[in-house]
Amino acid sequence: MLKPQTYMNHSGAAIAPLRSLPEFDPSRDLLVLVDDVALPLGRFRLRGAGSAGGHNGLKSIEAVLQRQDYARLRIGIGPMPPGLEDLSDFVLATFGPEERSALDDLLDPMADAVECWLAEGVERAMSLFNR
């Protein structure tokens, strides 16, 4: 069985089959939800394109797609606590009750943002939901 950090670093494998579909356009048809230690816990941000920013899952996706122009919904889990040195230990740690509550509060607005992205596109969703 693969260790969680090994598996999550191969996120591109999940979308590789889409590349063979002639109608698939990542800039229009793909929205990736991803954790982000650079965003405070309880915040999210939509982006229409950008770099992987050191995120191994996004690096894997970009390696498969050979492009960076796809939407991503970055979900804040940061900041990393002082004194903790291994990012993977932080990212893979279990959320405490207060952290879970903060993330639970994001579910409805994130679902609304995803629905807006589907109906109106990433630019409109970004203008409505990015703080």
Image: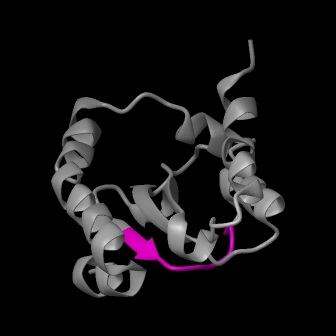
- Residue in view at x 22 percent, y 54 percent: 106
Q: Position of residue 64 (x, y in %)?
A: 80, 57
Residue 110 percent coordinates (x, y): 27, 59
Side of 97 relative to 3 (left or right): left
Residue that appears at 22% across and 48% down: 102
Q: Please state, as top left, top right, bottom left or bottom right, where the C terminus lies in the image.
A: bottom left
Tell me which residue sits at (23%, 82%) in the image.
Answer: 128
131 is within the stretch colored magenta:
no
Q: Position of 1 compared to 99: left or right? A: right
Q: Is residue 39 above or below residue 97?
A: below
Is 64 on the left or on the right of 52, as rendered? right
Magenta stretch, main secondary structure class = loop
Q: Quadrant of the N terminus?
A: top right
Q: Nearer the viewer, residue 22 or 5?
A: 22
* 46 with respect to 17 (left or right): left
Answer with the quarter of the image where residue 45 lies: bottom left
Front in this rendered view, residue 6 or 85? 6
Residue at horizontal 62 percent and vertical 71 percent from the top: 25
Q: What percent of the width, then of the height, locates residue 84? A: 59, 43
Compare residues 94 and 3 and report the one nearer the observer: 3
Q: Nearer the viewer, residue 11 or 91?
A: 11
- Image quadrant assignment for residue 116: bottom left
Q: What residue range appears in magenta?
A: 45-53
Position of residue 74 measured from the top left corner of the image (x, y, whole percent): 45, 63
